[in-house]
Amino acid sequence: MLVGLNIQDIVLIKRLNLDFGAGLAVMTGETGAGKSILLDSLGLALGNRADSGLLRHGSSQAMVTASFFVPNNHAVHKLLVEQGLDATDELLLRRTVNADGRSRAFINDQPVSASFLRQVGDVLVEIHGQHDDRGLLDARGHRDLLDVFADHDGLLANCAQSYRQWRESQKALNDALNMQEEAQRDEEYLRHAMEELDKLNPQPGEEAELAERRALMQQGEALSEGMSDTLEALSRDGGPDTQLRGAIRRLEKLNASSGLLDELLEALDRAAIEAEEAVFKLQKMHDGLDFDQNELEAIEARLFEIRALARKHSCPPDVLVELKSNLEARLEAIDGGADKIAALRKECSELRGVFEAAVGALTKSRETAATALSEAVNQELPPLKLDKARFKAVLEPLDKDHWQAEGGEKVAFEVSTNPGAPFGPIIKIASGGELSRFILALKVALADKSGARTMIFDEVDRGVGGATASAIGDRLARLAETAQLMVVTHSPQVAARGANHWRIQKSEQDDATVTTVVPLAIDDRREEIARMLSGAFVTDEARAAADSLLRGAA
């Protein structure tokens, strides 16, 4: 629901703040007072095209802010979330326009594109006028409107699901056929490559494991050679411990009488013991090395075979396992593909049948709904002074090859404005003065089943009066029971139906002409409706007639 509108420096509006409520709000005023400026301002906040011509003379920037209250289940929340914006109950749409024509758009003070602002605006508000070419007059949305009227969400969901399942099975069949054709074309190569892979039988991660083991064994080989050379050197002349023992014996003879060499002999004895232990440990380490030349050669041969085959197939070694699996699948397409394709053909045919049945059920429901909607709209036309006009919702069957998840037909709303005249699209057949009334009839027929919850009708009563204007007012009041309505009107019968009434007027302020909007209390409403009835000079008779209209509306 639109709850507020703030306008700054738009054409004749210097600064204007409006608060809106539920129900039917009417706006009246003399021709040229600025009603279109008000709608253009709101349209700007809703994402319509910006134009520097909208700026008030002498201003460098114009700004319009529209505030809305939207319940949690409103469709606008999905749009906001998809755009990465917070979905809140209070929504502010703001648009600025500079003198050079550049504009900026904001939602809850977050910058957005003008096109996205337009998307959000279209979900929040419907604006209908005699030149309206969107909304109910846009044939692209007629099927959706009919589906909402029919209230057959289950049939729509079933049709969409069966379509997806059929298309998925069709894709699986096409993929199998393509694989079989490709495999048959490359069969000789596939079998040779598969024979090589079968023979080698590479395992996941095997190349990395072999490379690591090879590196460790190469390190072991180098250590073994170095230790062997060291042991050989240490074993010469009996080894270091033997040589030290011989030296000790010779020195002991020299030290027998003096004792001067006692400390040296003790050091040499320790050295001999440690040398013996060192040689023993080195020998033990050498004997314990995990190195086998034959095993290293076998590992290297396996590693080189895997790498060579990977180079042949231009892929990393680890991909050979996946390649083998792919080749098996392609060969399976040759050897056992016929049975698989036959099964897929059968499944695809069965799912196509399910989809066609779902389309048939949806079409039948749409046909019933189209008849009911046509009857409902046609009942509304005579009171709206369209008694010679006829409306029908037309189902245009599509070729089966063009059936989609949404069903097997297009839908168009068509009218004939004179007996015997051919039916055609509303936008082409109806005159400017008739369009708004056709829209009103459609909205009444659709009632609470479609559209935004805020609707604006611009001079829906153009060119009519008396009973027809009264009928228009009655239908607008009925619509306002389930939606927020704002109506720009020249009809006193319509104005009297409003729960809220604003008068749009021009005045002089600081030597400039400005447009203002004045909320009317009951006495002011009486005077305004009397003016609409009698013209410039309000008579007592006009005031009495205004009282009668207000009492009738109440």
Image (tube, rainbow, N blue to C red):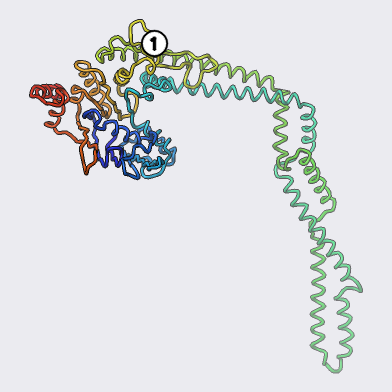
Quick one: which residue is furthest to the top in this view? Answer: 420
How many neighbours does mark 1 have within 10 angstroms: few (below 14), some (14-19), or many (20 or more)?
some
Q: In the figure, residue 365 lies in which quadrant? A: top left
Q: Position of residue 404 (x, y in %)?
A: 50, 20
Q: Which residue is mark 1?
A: 423
Q: Position of residue 198 (x, y in %)?
A: 77, 35
Q: Position of residue 200 (x, y in %)?
A: 79, 38
Q: Looking at the figure, which quarter contains the N terminus?
A: top left
Q: Amino acid at mark 1?
A: Phe
Does residue 208 lie above or below 417 as drawn?
below
Nearer to me, 359 or 111: 111
Does residue 346 lie above or below 93 as drawn?
above
The reply to whether residue 139 is in sight is yes
Task: Identify the element where label 1 is drawn.
Answer: loop
Nearer to me, 115 or 293: 115
Quick one: which residue is furthest to the right in this view? Answer: 237
Q: In the figure, residue 498 lies in which quadrant? A: top left
Q: As drawn, is 52 to the left or to the right of 321?
A: left
Q: Position of residue 333 (x, y in %)?
A: 70, 25
Nearer to me, 292 or 399: 399
Q: Looking at the figure, which quarter contains the C terminus?
A: top left
The reply to whether residue 445 is in sight is no
Give the residue displayed 80% in from the left and 45% down from the top: 302
Count of marks, rendered view:
1
Quick one: which residue is furthest to the left in this view? Answer: 540
Give the residue displayed 25% in from the left and 27% down from the top: 488
